Amino acid sequence: MTKSSGLFTLNFFLTDYVSIKNWAEDDKPREKLTSKGRENLSNAELLGILIGNGTRSKSAVDLARDILQIAQNDLAKLATLSIKDLCKVSGIGPAKAITIIAAIELGGRRKQARETPEFISSSKDAYSYFGPLLQDKQYEEFWILLLKQNNAIIGAHKISEGGMTGTVADHKRIFKVALENYAAHIILCHNHPSGSLKPSAADLKLTQKLVSAGKHLDLGILDHVIISHKGFYSFADAGLIE
């Protein structure tokens, strides 16, 4: 009786799972994308295409749903997951995790190429420039955006990178890079991997120090923007830069 009951349970489990290859044609992610267009696929279906193959008990789409659950169904949080994080899902190994991360990175680069402005006229423009670059980073980086007199972009330079909770920005290096590139203005930017958009005491102190030093060099600090996957914070918008 026990064996029969166990066999019934096993048979029920096996018959409850249906491989994608046995799905109706209109429901298969690849076929659905081809016939109906990519915009008609759910996030799980698109992710399932990247994963490719499922396991004996779960389809690729099921694995995708497990991954999205870890990310709380938030694509911004999904983009912050590491290879190690993704591999916590049973059925996801390093190869599949790397494929997912590569696809997310490619999407971020496409977004940056599409949204990058030629001139900076507001904090939103600065966010459009730096957001795709920094919002998914798992460690802090400090960048500066160099501008001409008319606020046309000269280029961006990474000043430093650190850990999860901070990085050191050398003010001498910041001004050296700016002066060597004949910048008239600078926008400061760093990211908060934690998602917090609140400036720390160190952020406030550094910004005040750089603004003061910039005045002596006739080099304006227009803004300091903090980036996270939740959005951005502007020192200029908050009235913290004169």
Image (cartoon, rainbow, N blue to C red):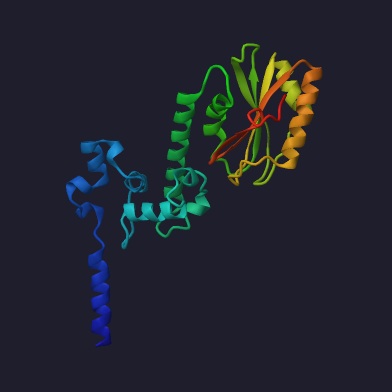
- The percent coordinates of residue 136 (x first, y second) are 54, 40
Q: Identify the residue at image location x=47%, y=46%.
A: 78
Q: Identify the residue at image location x=68%, y=39%.
A: 199
Q: Is residue 61 above or below residue 222?
A: below
Q: Nearer the viewer, residue 15 or 134?
A: 134
Query: Which residue occupies the extreme front position in the image?
Result: 239
Q: Is residue 116 above or below residue 139?
A: above
Q: Identify the residue at image location x=73%, y=26%.
A: 174
Is residue 124 left or right of 69 when viewed as pictured? Answer: right
Q: Nearer the viewer, residue 219 or 133?
A: 219
- In this rendering, does residue 168 appear at all? no
- In this rendering, does residue 51 appear at all? yes
Q: Identify the residue at image location x=57%, y=19%.
A: 121
Q: Is residue 19 above or below residue 16?
A: above
- The percent coordinates of residue 137 (x first, y second) are 57, 40
Q: Nearer the viewer, residue 13 or 203?
A: 203
- The quadrant of the rendering that contains the C terminus is top right
Quadrant of res 221: top right
- The percent coordinates of residue 210 (x first, y second) are 76, 27
